[in-house]
Amino acid sequence: MARAINWFLKSSLIVAVLLTGFANLIAQDRPAFADEVYRSDNLDGLEQVPEWLMVQVESALPSEGLNVWVPTGIFASSSLVRVPRFPRASRSIEKISKDQVLELQAVRNEQVSAQLAIAATDTLSDLQVQVSDLKSESGELIPASNVKVRYVKYVPVHRAYTGNTYEDVAGSEGLSGVSGFGGPDVVGDPLIELEKVGVPAFRAQPAWFTVKVPKENTPGRYEGTIKITSDQYGVVKLPIQLAVREYSIPDPQNYKFHMDAFMNPSSLASYYGVEAWSDGHWDLIKKYFANLASLGQKKITTTITEKPWKKPWLNDQMQPQTGTGYQSMVKWVLGSEGEWEFNYEIFDKYVETGLEVGVGPYISAYSMLTFRGAQRLTYLDEQKGKEVTEYLDVKDKRYKEVWTTFLRDFSAHLRQKGWLDQTYLGFDERPEELMNRIVGIIDQAAPEFKDKFYVSGTSKVNMFQYAKDLNLGYDFLPGGERSTDKMDKAIKKRIKEGRLVNFYMTCCSSTHPNRYSFSPAVENYLLGWISLKHNLDGYADWAYNSWPKDVFSFPVFNYPQGDEYFVYPGVEGPMSSIRWELLKESIEDYELVKILKEQGRISDERLSEAIQLVTQNPDGRMKDVNTIIEAKNILLH
């Protein structure tokens, strides 16, 4: 305790660590948020911590000097938990020995992640973690450039205004990896790329490793060294070993898994402070599309109306349900003679950009039906000389006339571009009576769209007939809290017919599993396996990048933290997260299973055993994550 108090009294003497390597990351026109986010001496946003918290950490660390440990005790499962910023004695921390081999396994063309936690009772300056080339007995290499080292950044925990509560998800004991017990609460999620970082005393700093195995490498054992360097403790070297198995998974563009996360281009423009649809905006769009493509993203989410996802807020005012609403990619113009014109320039460029970097091939267009409230159209009225919003009822003749005009024009445009067969009309959580009327309009106006509906969030079995591509909430899947025999039979029928069925977990659909910032990390790894368990096509998510105003210091807009985004805004493009990396790796497992089944390499019994091991307990707080390693061993042996 004396050491803790002494440090507390002298905390003002701690010298801030220089921002080594920062200049290489940030362009001259870096966004305004960059300086604070990339402070290499403070990855949790906290200047000081309470004395009692320091005492707690001191009692948890095995020794006074440098402490390096594997969070789960097994390197292969270490990425499946979050490391509390402030270690606690109730968690087992076993200091790693210098001769302990850190073992991983992967197939060719797969990525695999792991992490080490590092902490000391004094400040660590210029902490740097590096990995050498990994070399096989025959001299073949997995080059160091294929091993990315990132540092887990911590963000404050804030309560949401709606949806699941932090207490229900994280638990009162912080079992999801949240640390602070209210003074302060922080959780590790963003993965920040810096050459070196500073670690203030009594804080844990995880180093996150991601190894990408080249597809052409020969199976075998590859060995190398992890080097941990700090000014205070010099160099610590640890042996790492990667077993590359004989199988190979396809490139993301050839994944069978149907990944569909909605990207919000308007949020990109807003957060980075660039003009919408400017050159700078298109550069960002391309980079974020490329990030989606790395997970095999199958859909390009487009908007054909202005801010289609509005809902009532305070005083019943209709506002976007995300911090920044989606601008329409189609410009509607009502001419002075009452004729309609539609400008598809932005729509076309957006689709072309996505296709260019490997997103697609499908296009979803939102929306003939607004998310909540009265139906509305926003357009430039040339006679009035201004933009207006007109409110309509689906029953109105005017509604039918306007949408008939648009659908026919839209269909002709898509046909001209060669995109008609791959475009879906998107509908999000709309009641059956509204859908019945819409179907009638489409049947008369543009029947070519009648079997091209993309429907999310329905609990009505009768709605299944409309959706060629269907997204179901996790709770509606067989065995879920809101499943029924009728629903189960309808899902099985769709699957048998070869019609797409995806699932999603968002907002209030389930407490566990979920993918909030403070959800247990392992729950993100369940997503691909849940699809395997229920024989589904993939996973859909309503918000890939809909950030609140300052996602790093106040990371909530309305829904539970992280529900509105999977990645963070980095200086020059997307900053990944623990959640995003684990989702990717679960998709890779999905692809591996499909290959093993096609090749007759695994029996139904063994596959069922593996799926059961991974999915049997969806509450990550109580889950033995090492059972996932057992499941992976079943696939690879």
Image (cartoon, helix red, strand yellow):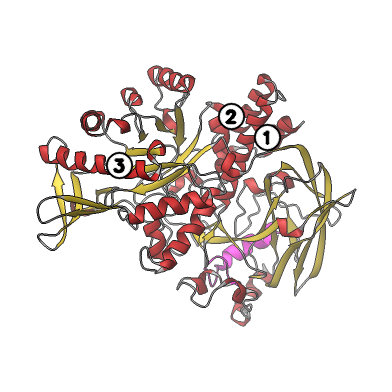
Identified at 12% across, 41% down, the residue is: 398
Left or right of 77? Residue 222 is right
**Earlier residue among tags 3 and 2:** 3
Residue 280 image offset from top left, x and y in percent:
44, 67
Secondary element type, mark 2: loop
Above or below, 544 relative to 549: above
- Asked whether disc 3 touches disc 1, contact meaning CB atoms under 8 Å apart, the reply is no
Q: What residue would you read off at disc 3?
A: 412
Identified at 19% across, 49% down, the residue is: 377
Q: Which residues are magenta?
A: 40-61
| Residue 282 occupies quadrant | bottom left
Q: What residue would you read off at disc 1?
A: 627
Residue 422 image offset from top left, x and y in percent:
42, 38
Is 593 covered by the magenta stretch? no
Q: What residue would you read off at disc 2?
A: 616
Left or right of 606? Residue 377 is left
Residue 318 image offset from top left, x and y in percent:
22, 51
**Earlier residue among tags 1 and 2:** 2
Q: Which quarter of the rendering shows the N terminus? A: bottom right
Q: Is residue 565 visible?
A: no
3D distance between C-alphas at marks 3 and 2: 49 Å
Amino acid on which disc 2 is placed: Gln
